[in-house]
Amino acid sequence: MTHAADILHRAAAQGIMIATVESCTGGMVAAALTDIPGSSAVVERGFVTYSNQAKVDLVGVSPATLDAYGAVSEAVAAEMASGALAHAPVQLAVSITGIAGPGGSEHKPEGRVCFGIATPDGTQTETVEFGALGRDAVRQAACNHALSLLSAALRRD
């Protein structure tokens, strides 16, 4: 069973609906989940919030948070994930915001990706430094990590 198939199986068994909120991955996590037949029983929706305005408009990220911390931050990842719970009938949401490259800066280097996992019990965040692997590799690594976070959240419940 693939990672995504295992997530869908666990979520279905627990009656949990999932949403994704993706920036640098542009919908890759939602695509990985919805590639599997029957995923509609678990995947409620995916938000692609590539721009800051989309983060504000679609999932309620605060402009003040964006101004204070920037889009690539755990604060924004937390608001993205918790915003999905507020804007969709789901019990589990994962968010991703990062710098896939090329580019970045000294303070926010290429390969830095922030993640959020939200459930009705709260939101957890983390940052992973994948390094300057190249755009495609960073995006795939971020997608895989998000799937791992969903899997871990479903094992906790």
Image (tube, rainbow, N blue to C red):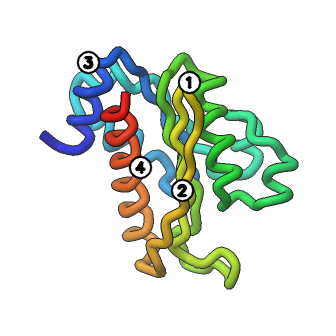
Which residue is the extreme one toward the bottom?
106
Label 3: state its secondary structure. Answer: helix
Q: Earlier in the sequence, mark 1 or mark 3?
A: 3
Between disc 1 and disc 4, the foreground one is: 1
Q: Residue at x 28, y 29 (%)?
A: 8
| Mark 2 closeness class: few <14, some 14–19, many ≥20 residues within 10 Å | some
The residue at which mark 2 appears reads as: 126
Q: Nearer the viewer, residue 31 or 154?
A: 154
Looking at numbered disc 3 in the image, what kind of residue is underneath it?
A: Ala
Looking at the image, residue 135 sits to the left or right of residue 83; the answer is: left
| Mark 1 closeness class: few <14, some 14–19, many ≥20 residues within 10 Å | few
Residue 85 point in image, percent of width and height? 59, 26
The residue at which mark 4 appears reads as: 146
The residue at which mark 3 appears reads as: 13
Between disc 2 and disc 4, the foreground one is: 2
**Disc 4, disc 3: CB below 8 Å?**
no
Looking at numbered disc 2 in the image, what kind of residue is underneath it?
A: Glu
Q: Earlier in the sequence, mark 4 or mark 3?
A: 3
The residue at which mark 1 appears reads as: 120
Residue 147 point in image, percent of width and height? 35, 46
In the displayed structure, would residue 89 be above or below residue 71?
A: above
Q: Quarter holding the N terminus?
A: top left
Residue 46 point in image, percent of width and height? 50, 34
